[in-house]
Image (cartoon, grey):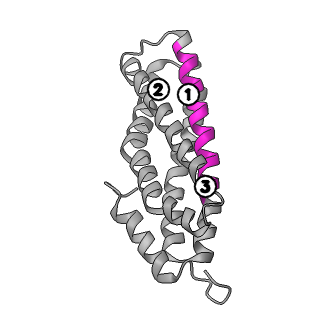
Amino acid sequence: MTQSDPTPSALRATTDEHHARLLPHVDRLLVLADMVGQVECAALHALFEEEHTFIVGQLLPHMETVELALYDRIEVLMGGRHSMAPMREEHRSVRRLVEELSRYKEHAEGCSWSAVEGLALRRALYRLHSLLKVHLAEEELYLGVLERSLTQAEKDQLARGLDHAMTEPL
């Protein structure tokens, strides 16, 4: 977006829309973590199931799409000076935390986790929430690099790649 053109690019609009749809789910992870051990398991099961389904079905595919569509391009633009390796490592950390949460899915269905497992579940939810909040904020910074460095046609192409590469739109 240039100073003379206040209209957001398709890339900015697509990314803003995706983040706006992701953030309420990210924030619900904190709510869910606070519920573990404080309310009856059955009361948090529906929210756990909903958020786990969202994470596996929407967040992970979105994350992989962003990495494939944008990260290499950002590295080229930045001349390799600021590698996207930390962002890729955060994606690996998110995947590990989601695997950990998936182990609790079976316990959640039968409300059969122990107090120790409940603490571990809370820890995983808190960590995932924190990591995603920081990661999405960092993505905003890198989006600025793309906005300043690419032509409108290149930004439009990246936006289409984000939308078309999604298995299901957010």
Relative image position of residue 54 (x, y in whole percent): 41, 43
Circle 3 or circle 1, nearest the eye: 3
Kind of residue at badge 3 = Ser
Q: Marks 2 and 1: in contact by CB < 8 Å?
A: yes
Label 1: how many residues lie within 10 Å, few (<14), some (14-19) or many (20+)? many
Q: Secondary structure at mark 1?
A: helix
**Residue located farthest toward the bottom when viewing the structure as drawn:** 4
Q: Is residue 138 magenta?
A: yes
Relative image position of residue 7 (x, y in whole percent): 57, 82
The residue labelled by disc 1 is 124
Image quadrant of residue 69? bottom left
Which part of the image, by quadrant, shows the N terminus? Answer: bottom right
Q: CA distance from mark 3 to mark 1?
A: 27 Å
Q: Secondary structure at mark 3?
A: loop
Magenta stretch, residue numbers: 117-139
**Residue drawn at point x = 50 percent, y = 71 percent:** 11
Residue 105 vs 20, above or below: the answer is above
The residue labelled by disc 3 is 83
Q: Is residue 81 left or right of residue 97?
A: right
The first of marks 1 and 2 along the sequence is: 2
Image quadrant of residue 112? top left
Residue 100 vs 14, above or below: the answer is above
Kind of residue at badge 2 = Glu
